[in-house]
Structure formats: C-alpha cells, structure tokens
Amino acid sequence: MKNFKNYIFDLGAVIADINTQNALDEFRALGIPEEELRYDEGPTARIMQNYQLGFLTTDEFCDAIIGRSVASTKPTRQQVADAWNTIIINIPQQKIDALRTLKKRAKIYLLSNTTELHWQKCLDLWFNANGNNAQDCFHHIFLSHEMHLEKPNPEIFKQVIREISALQFCDAANPMNDAHDAATPIIDASNTVFLDDNLANVQSAMNCGISGIHVTPDYDWIAELL
C-alpha cells in the first residue's frame, strides 16, 4: 500500500460501527408508518436528509419525526433522539489508536455525512472519552450538517480540497501568504486518498482528482495503512 500524505476518512462503517436499520426499527416502534421507513423516498426520508444537511436543527428534526408518528401517544424529543442514535453502535479503541498513529506521519481528515446527534454521541462516548481527544485523531473535521453538502455530491469534495489546501498553505508559513488564492488547490492529488464504504462516494472523490479506497467489510484499513 502506497504511503499517502493526506488521508480523508469517512466515519460510518469505516471508523464507527453502525447499523441504520436500528433507527428505522426504533422509529417504527414510535409510530412512524412502515411505508415511510426508507432512506430513499418519502417525507421521513426528506426529514432525515435535511437534518444530515444541517437544514434542520436537532429540535426541528425531532419535532418533524414526532409529526409523522401515528401513535396514540406521541413520542418525546428525547425518545426520537435516542432512537436516531441507535445507528451508532461503537468506535473501536484500536481504530482511534490507529488514527493517532497515522496522524504522526500524515495529514488526517474526517469527511462524514452525519448529524449533530450522531457526531455528539461519537465525541461523548469515544473520541473525547477514556483519555481520547478528537484533535489527536484528525487535523480537521468536515461534517455534512455543518457544510450543508453531502456525499456523493462532487461539490463537497471540491470544498474539502479547497479547505485542506488553505489549511496546509497556512501551516507552511509561506511568505507569499497574501498572494495565495484559497480557491486554487495546492494539495498533491496523487498523494491524497479518500476511504469510504459507499462506492458512489469513492467514485465521486476520484472524479474530483483524488485517489479512493472502497472500504468493504473484509478490508482492514489498519493493517493496510499502518
């Protein structure tokens, strides 16, 4: 495996253990109609996507889900939040340790389609718990709900490339700082790789000029990269 200078990691199914069906099952128990429990269509799917894009606050997301419930007793915001968070199961400590080790010899970034609730759970239970610190794992973190963009939209990759370029330019303390156009990428695309479990996301990244690794269940990125 080639040693890259820049590694961009997805979160779910690459770093974090997840199961999206968990939340759908929990939403069903809260009275969301069966026909709405799909990620690709329907009112509930749009609510989830808008939350992932940061177009809804957490309270607005919970209230929107409550509004879709046909249960005689409407769920509470906390019940909706808890149901949504069942998607995130665990982040193995060995993966956190691997990221910290890799960060000593390369630039490490996170790029995730995620929501405020999911990300806060990851911070509270793993990245910032048990002596860990998210800053020890990543040089910068890119989240869909903060960027208002999501994978596989190529615009999110273009934005990440621009921001990484600007960050690395500032780190280099180049005396020509004032002359740099942040919109012009300076990172070496041939030395940048994106890891994701979704093939469409990997292909979109590669179309934007960076290398890609499709992380399948039998791919051990720790063994491959360290």
Image: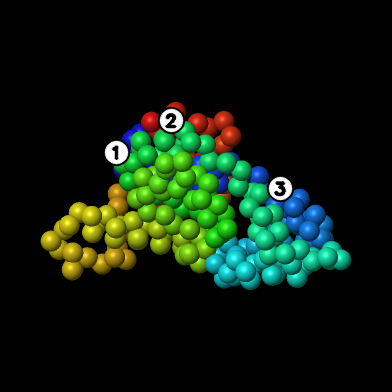
Q: CA distance from mark 2 to mark 3?
A: 29 Å
Q: In the picture provided, is 113 more to the left or to the right than 139? A: right
Q: Secondary structure at mark 2?
A: helix
Residue type marked 2 = Glu
Does residue 194 appear in this view? no
Q: Residue at x 67, y 55 (%)?
A: 82
Residue 81 x %, y %:
65, 59
Residue 38 falls in which quadrant of the image?
A: bottom right
Q: Quadrant of the N terminus?
A: top left
Q: Secondary structure at mark 3?
A: helix
Q: Quadrant of the C terminus?
A: top left
Label 1 belongs to which residue? 105
Q: Which mark is residue 224?
A: 2
Q: Is residue 37 above or below residue 87?
A: below
| Lower sequence index among marks 2 and 1 | 1
Residue 83 x %, y %:
69, 54
Labels 3 & 1 near each other (Cβ < 8 A): no
Tag 2: Cα neighbours inside 10 Å, few (<14), some, or many (≥20)?
A: few
| Lower sequence index among marks 3 and 1 | 3
Q: In the picture provided, is 34 more to the left or to the right than 176? A: right
Residue type marked 1 = Arg
Q: CA distance from mark 3 to mark 1?
A: 37 Å
Q: Residue at x 32, y 66 (%)?
A: 183
Q: Residue at x 29, y 58 (%)?
A: 167
How many marks overall?
3
Tag 3: Cα neighbours inside 10 Å, few (<14), some, or many (≥20)?
A: few
Labels 2 & 3 near each other (Cβ < 8 A): no
Residue type marked 3 = Gln
Label 3 belongs to which residue? 21
Looking at the rendered image, the disc whose residue lies closer to the viewer, 2 or 3, is 3
Q: CA distance from mark 2 to mark 1?
A: 15 Å
**Which residue of the protein is positioned furthest toward the left in this rendering?**
175
